[in-house]
Image (cartoon, coloured by chain):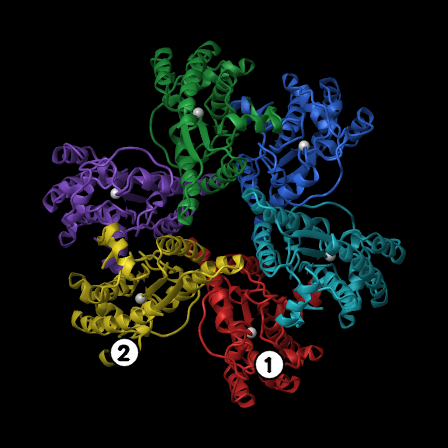
Chain colours: A yellow, B purple, C green, D blue, E cyan, F red
């Protein structure tokens, strides 16, 4: 069930059965020569949608722009400052709490979001902890590629060059979601360099075409479909456990 | 051209021809018994996408959650506080400015966003004005139903009961976009009451099913298609003029 | 009754009869070659004072500096950033709420304030809406020139060249309030250009002496007196209706 | 010269001769049974106006609402939170700096403002100090009752019961400024208790009618006139020295 | 009793007997050629520790970095912006309030902190005052050199050249605390100039080696010991009175 | 070299040789029945001090209060909200950048700080990335127990019951640092439960005496000494590599 395509009476009826919701959370940032700027939002959105459709979970709107300052050297990337992101996430959480949601599961699509999402959770809990009241809701984040079976299938599909940014697997998932957006680009070098980075200038200098450690020319819609199938099942299992916790 | 489905080299190439971008901006909030919670994001998103596809404009990601505190009495509505929204919009604007965009056109789908979007623009300009530097970019917002020809077609399609919230026309647009989400609901009363409101409690008391002045049971995908066609043309005209200004 | 010239026991006595207060709100910004920098604060202050004196309403202190970034190219203009203005207005509202005021009517003197005042109202309501409590007070703004009869008398007095900034009518009101400040300046061109603007640099370039569309050399204290008389009556009518709502 | 009654070309001309400006800064808060809520804004406003008229200094708009949380137990008092006040003062300072002012002299009327004004100055300087640039302006505050000769004349006029809040001397100054607002109230006890306070509840409990240590029934317009004369001279001397520093 | 070296059950036991805590608060900033950057944190920390050990008071962690923008022209100085400091102090206060502390006594070591600490207290009280609830705790600050007997002993030990920054007395206290850090430096000039300052550039220009009015080459561990003994007694007296108030 | 015990000329001399600094960062929070509230600040402080003394690195002041909302159910714990912590860390970073430091290495002592420290780094980099300038400094954090050899020695010393909060190893380090603070407490149960937590109420319910998975009664000063020796060497190696990077 997609919140954005539901009416309020439908969500009200859902809340009588379940107090849980999934929020896909991504980023709008460069994903190399053949990857989509929306990759990190598209991946969790697609996985959450398919899982929600199959298992009946409510899937909220995608929090699509996240923490991407390091990609600003590449055209089209958009970032929130961490303090803005913490404020926005807390407004979402406060709104969902207002309606009685008690389990909010963020399915994350961007490694750079993880720490700021956690800081936002702590900001939310801190208000209750300082007031001396028990917080009535629980917050959780999981990045889709961290499910064991997803990691495994990605390893199988891309034994080499999956990489850590603009990965073959995430590009594949977006190609599955938007086959019309498949881009045929020769990668030079075939596999991008590895490394760490700080700000946007540093990133651009070290990773000239935006990729880190990956050869995303291996990505196909079919491989993406496979990943989504596996991720969907993993997500359903995790969400069921979480909503029941 | 959809930024989310483009690669960074594609956006870089676009920027050589044009410094303009369209950002659909909406809200996630109740839209009455048969309207979608995502209505206000979906409408500008669909119109901008069709316009962008036809005229070649770059359409950025949708700023989907906006200013909706007055709808929080209805399940599923999500709001940003105005100060959060101003911060988030400024982060988007600063990111786009970083890449060299000079005309940022927000196509708005929610009346409740208008004043806060304007305050965000002023916040952005104020930084330049206080520094004594000329701001290198221009910001503009237009709500899709305010184009003259759109207002006219809506009047033709719904001579009575278009209303001012959960309007027949906006519901029609979303039914065109997501025909699988069409909801068949009898409206009681047929046309909802008119009026003004302050906070969520006040709104809920005055408008028990969420609608204001509308009978959205008149909405059909076909009527939505008609509205989108008209809006698309109007948007192309406005955007061409704006990007050339 | 002027709050600033009342004692606290007098205001306490007032609150037993009425829960309403008027707050004049303006801006300190250039008003062309013969207009006062304080114009936008002076106009609502004078109108509110005369209305309050006649009808017994409580008139609070003037919120005198507002949103004026676009005028910073002209010496003497002072602005708040919108986020600062939202914070300050919320502190005023919270203070008045603490005392039990339930209707706060902002009489506005500056077009540039309107959206940020509205955003401040939404910020205030949002706190209650997110908490799930009914907000115990109502907030309203009206700009003095928007009363129908005021618009009409201004049209009569200045059939041409009233304009939209440094208007003949607002300058006339200030000349009525401060006849010692009347400035005799020849306008070149007689009527200023019309147009739209973004930041301070853009404004200054388009409107070299600060006026927009006006010929304020037509302003006289007598015409100002006439406008204030009409505005006073309109305000009393509106305020009585609002406080009784 | 009153900024609010000047045109921008007049202020521009002034800036060719002087880079200094006086900003009266006050508070809107209870001042006991016969004192005006606006006392702390009125006093520096009157003194600054007379000094500016005599010596030709530019006097800006009054920053009228300040830091008054401890008075919120008395109807009509309005406060800014310190962080809001720091933001607002910095917006004023940034605006004045934009125009080229280099000496900004805040004439203060409220003891409770002093620390927050200083914190605002430090916030302003800190931006420059962290950037490693020399700040081009200087900021100063003085409370009008702290001039030696003012302290002396108050002591002469009110050898007993001048007190420390709702003082006989400040009430006298307001009676001079607004003789129509003189209030004839018997004080019980004649002289109010002394003491220290924390929040509004604590203040109200210790000082039931709002006064601290004072018998303001001694205040008359004539005594106020005398104080203003002395304060005006002291201010001119201080301002001349400061603007020349 | 040092909170940092206590366990939570020990602090819980303490709270059964006393609701008071001492927080040393300082700054990390240059203290001239022979003074330690940590001087302003070390002094109140040492005095509070000895007082706490002797009288059984609970001494919390040192708030070590404060308001020092004016010292940023000298290497090693670190500052908080006042608004950050207000936020941080309020988080500390809210945490201590959560545990039931009702008297929080800040023993201050830096003149530049005083106004911002006070603004932080007002920010804390304002939340209660605006809510209309009595604040359950009291906040107090005293700077260690302001105790009468401390002022007197410093005057005795350093009849000349104690000064107002990088004072002989504060350097002596740190030498007592860290005798291994004694620095033997010839002062040129022997006694530093006096004066006032604004930002870091202004400070550095006026006070080339960082001292104001002092000759700290007079400092010895023995003199520091003497000062600490006197300060400890004064603090115990003040704290006992405050905790009992 | 301890910044707090150095003079500014000494730090200036240091900066001629090295642009790097170590900042210990901790938390003030319960550490079970026999652990110190200051544990998380003490551990990195001691290790950094010994490493700095041996290898000549500059060690700055300890950022002692961090992100500890989940411990507020236990008396004495103090927290910063994440947004406050981000602001404070950025003020520290801006100050150090002002002096020319280019490598700032935070040695962390608290798992709960990690994500917020990272968000603070991103906030800092984002300012440069959005401005389009290369950030001139690099920021790094490492938690002392994450060095491989430290993990190994802790495993050797405490093959069972080291745990994940109030660990035997961290308590041992504090006992080495403050042998006078050793507390002899019988643990019930001997080894504390494992698990995850959200807010303070949740934490307290699951971990009644504050420990997670640990038996810190095994801690002794001698074992702490051993850990510090190993950690010191690891830190020197890491810091040398980092400062040279
Ligand atoms: Ni990605
Ligand atoms: Ni809508
Ligand atoms: Ni105007
Ligand atoms: Ni006063
Ligand atoms: Ni000092
Ligand atoms: Ni720990």
SS of the residue under disc 2: helix
Chain under callout 2: A
Few, some or many residues within 10 Å of mark 1 (<14, 14–19, 20+): many
Q: Position of residue B82 (x, y in %)?
A: 40, 44
- The quadrant of the picture occupied by the N terminus of chain D is top right
Q: Position of residue A69 (x, y in %)?
A: 40, 59
Few, some or many residues within 10 Å of mark 2 (<14, 14–19, 20+): some
For residue A209, say whether it is visible: no
Badge 1 is on which residue?
F232
Residue at image point 52% right, 80% down? F192
**Is residue F43 found left or right of C127 in the rendered image?**
right
Q: Is residue D2 above or below residue A41?
A: above
Depth check: D139 or A194 in front? D139
Q: Position of residue E125 (x, y in %)?
A: 61, 47
> Which mark, residue A149?
2
Residue at image point 24% right, 70% down? A232
Which picture quadrant has residue D220? top right
> Which mark, residue A190?
none
**Is residue A98 found left or right of E217 in the rendered image?**
left
Which picture quadrant has residue C148? top left
**CA–CA distance between discs 2 and 1?**
40 Å
Q: Is residue E16 above or below residue D8?
A: below
For residue C207, say whether it is visible: yes
Q: Closer to the observer: label 2 or label 1?
A: 2
């Amino acid at each position: 069930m997609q919140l954005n395509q539901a009416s309020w009476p439908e969500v009200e009826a859902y809340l009588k059965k379940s107090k849980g919701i999934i929020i896909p959370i991504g980023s709008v940032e460069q994903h190399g020569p053949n990857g989509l700027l929306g990759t990190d939002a598209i991946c969790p959105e697609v996985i959450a949608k398919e899982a929600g459709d199959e298992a009946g979970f409510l899937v909220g709107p995608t929090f699509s722009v996240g923490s991407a300052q390091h990609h600003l050297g590449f055209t089209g990337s958009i970032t929130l400052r961490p303090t803005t992101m913490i404020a926005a996430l807390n407004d979402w959480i406060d709104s969902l709490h207002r309606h009685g949601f008690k389990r909010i599961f963020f399915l994350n699509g961007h490694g750079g979001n993880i720490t700021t999402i956690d800081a936002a959770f702590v900001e939310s809990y801190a208000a209750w902890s300082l007031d001396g009241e028990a917080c009535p809701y629980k917050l959780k984040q999981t990045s889709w590629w961290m499910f064991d079976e997803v990691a495994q299938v990605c390893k199988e599909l891309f034994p080499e060059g999956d990489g850590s940014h603009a990965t073959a697997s995430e590009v594949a998932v977006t190609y599955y979601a938007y086959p019309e957006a498949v881009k045929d680009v020769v990668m030079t070098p075939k596999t991008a360099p590895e490394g760490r980075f700080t700000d946007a200038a540093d990133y651009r200098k070290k990773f000239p075409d935006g990729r880190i450690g990956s050869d995303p020319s291996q990505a196909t819609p079919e491989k993406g479909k496979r990943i989504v199938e596996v991720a969907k099942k993993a997500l359903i299992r995790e969400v069921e456990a979480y909503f029941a916790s």
